[in-house]
Image: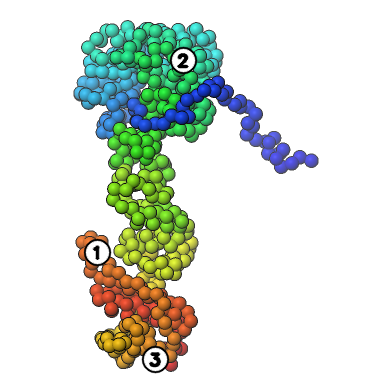
């Protein structure tokens, strides 16, 4: 008899047997695991090229201008602005940058070209008159590309690189007024035998003859991410050790995110010796994207390392990226997503609230569940805690305090939070600060019937004596009570009036700061009383704290009385 699993396997294409594991790199004395990143790498944004070539609708010239100005504002010093030999809009954009003098003195533009003579010539046409530029030439070197795409052997592919390098050098000589920087990528490096990648790169640098003073950029792309990041780091360290003229090379990496590890791969590559990192904002790019520079830079930032990019206005970055790529930014995108500084779950809210309360100005950041201070990237604490059915008393209390200045004592938080939880469960969604306040008032504050207090006075002798007008269902009565403190006196007066046992269990009060002026206008009192054996809580706000506490106890008593109408009648 066939099992369900057998049946499923027969009808499904989901068969891992057709894949092979990626081979390990033999590097028993690898050094990179012990290295630390202590400074930002050289960054190069490829948003306008690799990012652009992956869009459903490539950026218009207007969108490219907008993106370029954002990249400059963020602080990129190298920006790959396009593939000018590939399309007229890319060519025109490069011309506009040069002719309209849009390239700041300290920014170098970079352009990509295949290693084909006619494309290289056109590339240099596009760059005529530029002050300084990186010409980035590439060809594929991997086994699969050699065998199946180019149908060439190792020598044939190396010759494409050599002829490309020669053509670049020859064209550059035609424009001596420009300061040229050459860049070569053995495209699909991750699928290339390491000794062969080194051989091709050595052949290219043998033509360009870089020096320490005039280095070239050798860019090693994980065109497709094929293995775990540690294997990429091994590849980089292996290459770094073997390549000739290393002192005259700026070693760059360009990782893609096929396995979801592009950032990790770039980080480990820097530990393995890379000097420079190419990537895009929010990781837009071919397939699963390029390496996300925002994430890598913020990772550095969160370790106390200056990323040398200004990412403080994250919402502006997101706005421009969205406008130019027409792609959304995931709400849980590292550092930038709209939900990443929001805690819904109870224990997280509790921990964040406690850490924030203990935090002193000037302390190193050390807040549970928040790797960075949201304020650093223009987010406020306002968004940190939001309440739904997963939330606990800490989150509810945080919102009441943040939005209304009400600092609920712990015993009241415990009493109130199940009510918010229930409301969240019923709605199935989020409960806003205003809704929490409404529930709070409904549960504890708005209880002015059947009894309410009119004029009163408290005389202090050895005891407190309370004399008050008490309105019961609108009828004025006289209430007299004696006790230890005015609340005890009120409790005793009510006991006489209604024949029920009232004992104050908990009491708390504080001034309420006005949200805008910061002045203390009113006070709030919170009371918990045991009434005929059951616990009731009440709260009241008044400019006079004594009135607030008396009303808070009456709110608690009114809940009991409303539930037990008989008691009022007698
Ligand atoms: C991993 C990357 O991101 S690499 C960058 C990829 N980006 C792009 O391709 C975007 C822009 N590209 C384009 O618009 C076009 O590819 C163009 C205009 C540049 C060229 O278009 P076409 O001339 O039609 O050629 P196409 O791109 O299809 O390339 C195929 C030919 O170029 C050769 N080729 C491809 N890449 C390279 C290279 N880097 N160096 C030399 N030759 C190359 C191929 O062998 C093939 O040759 P064949 O025609 O003799 O079979
Ligand atoms: C052109 C190269 C660097 C590239 O984009 C890649 O290999 O991913
Ligand atoms: Mg790429």
Q: Nearer the viewer, residue 167 or 479?
A: 479
Q: Residues within 10 Å of mark 1 (few under 14, many from 20)?
A: few
Q: Residue at x 38, y 87 (%)?
A: 492
N-terminal of the pair, mark 3 or mark 1, is 3
Point out residue 102 in the picture as x, y percentages from the top left corner: 22, 26
Image marks 3 and 1: residues in contact by CB distance under 8 Å: no
N-terminal of the pair, mark 1 or mark 2, is 2
Q: Which mark is residue 496?
A: 3
Q: Residues within 10 Å of mark 3 (few under 14, many from 20)?
A: some
Point out residue 525 in the picture as x, y percentages from the top left corner: 32, 73
Alpha-carbon span between mark 3 and mark 1? 39 Å
Give the residue pinned by disc 1.
514
Q: Is residue 42 visible?
A: yes
| Apparent side of residue 533 relative to residue 12 in the rendered image (left or right) | left
Identify the element where label 1 is drawn.
loop
Q: Is residue 447 visible?
A: no
Q: Quadrant of residue 80?
A: top left
Q: Residue at x 34, y 26 (%)?
A: 42
Identify the element where label 2 is drawn.
helix
Point out residue 563 in the picture as x, y percentages from the top left corner: 45, 81
Image quarter of the C terminus: bottom left
């Amino acid at each position: 008899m066939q099992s369900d699993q057998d049946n499923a396997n027969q009808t499904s294409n989901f068969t891992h047997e057709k894949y092979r594991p990626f081979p390990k790199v033999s590097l028993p004395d690898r050094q990179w695991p012990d290295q630390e990143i202590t400074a930002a790498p050289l960054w190069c944004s490829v948003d306008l090229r690799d990012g652009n070539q992956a869009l459903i609708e490539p950026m218009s010239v207007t969108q490219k201008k907008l993106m370029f100005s954002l990249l400059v504002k963020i602080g990129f010093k190298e920006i790959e602005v396009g593939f000018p030999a590939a399309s007229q809009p890319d060519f025109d954009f490069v011309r506009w940058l040069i002719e309209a003098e849009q390239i700041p003195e300290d920014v170098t533009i970079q352009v990509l070209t295949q290693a084909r003579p006619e494309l290289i010539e056109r590339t240099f046409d596009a760059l005529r008159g530029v002050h300084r530029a990186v010409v980035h030439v590439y060809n594929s070197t991997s086994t699969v590309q050699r065998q199946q795409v180019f149908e060439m052997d190792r020598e044939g592919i190396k010759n494409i690189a050599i002829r490309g390098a020669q053509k670049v050098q020859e064209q550059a000589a035609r424009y001596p007024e420009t300061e040229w920087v050459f860049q070569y990528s053995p495209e699909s490096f991750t699928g290339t035998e390491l000794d062969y990648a080194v051989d091709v790169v050595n052949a290219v640098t043998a033509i360009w003859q870089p020096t320490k003073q005039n280095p070239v950029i050798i860019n090693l792309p994980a065109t497709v991410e094929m293995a775990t990041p540690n294997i990429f780091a091994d590849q980089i360290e292996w290459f770094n050790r073997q390549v000739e003229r290393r002192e005259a090379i700026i070693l760059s990496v360009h990782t893609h995110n096929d396995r979801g590890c592009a950032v990790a791969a770039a980080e480990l590559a820097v530990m393995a010796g890379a000097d420079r990192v190419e990537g895009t904002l929010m990781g837009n790019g071919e397939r699963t994207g390029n390496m996300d520079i925002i994430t890598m830079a913020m990772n550095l930032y969160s370790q106390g390392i200056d990323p040398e990019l200004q990412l403080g206005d994250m919402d502006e970055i997101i706005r421009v990226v969205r406008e130019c790529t027409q792609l959304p930014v995931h709400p849980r995108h590292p550092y930038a997503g709209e939900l990443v500084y929001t805690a819904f779950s109870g224990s997280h809210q509790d921990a964040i609230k406690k850490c924030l309360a203990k935090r002193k100005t000037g302390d190193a950041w050390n807040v549970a569940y928040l790797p960075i201070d949201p304020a650093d990237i223009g987010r406020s604490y306002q968004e940190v805690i939001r309440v739904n059915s997963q939330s606990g008393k800490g989150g509810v209390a945080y919102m009441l305090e943040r939005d209304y200045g009400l600092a609920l004592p712990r015993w009241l938080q415990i009493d109130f939070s199940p009510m918010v939880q229930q409301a969240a469960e019923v709605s199935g969604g989020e409960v806003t600060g205003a809704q929490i306040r409404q529930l709070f008032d409904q549960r504890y504050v708005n209880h002015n019937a059947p009894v309410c207090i009119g004029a009163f006075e408290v005389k202090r002798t050895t005891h407190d004596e309370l004399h008050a007008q008490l309105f019961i269902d609108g009828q004025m009565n006289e209430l007299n009570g004696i006790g230890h403190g005015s609340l005890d006196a009120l409790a005793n007066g009510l006991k006489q009036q209604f024949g029920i046992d009232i004992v104050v269990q908990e009491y708390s009060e504080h001034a309420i700061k006005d949200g805008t002026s910061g002045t203390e206008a009113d006070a709030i009192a919170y009371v918990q009383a045991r009434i005929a054996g059951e616990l009731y809580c009440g709260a009241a706000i008044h400019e006079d704290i004594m009135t607030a506490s008396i009303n808070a106890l009456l709110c608690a008593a009114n809940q009991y009385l409303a539930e037990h109408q008989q008691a009022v009648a007698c």
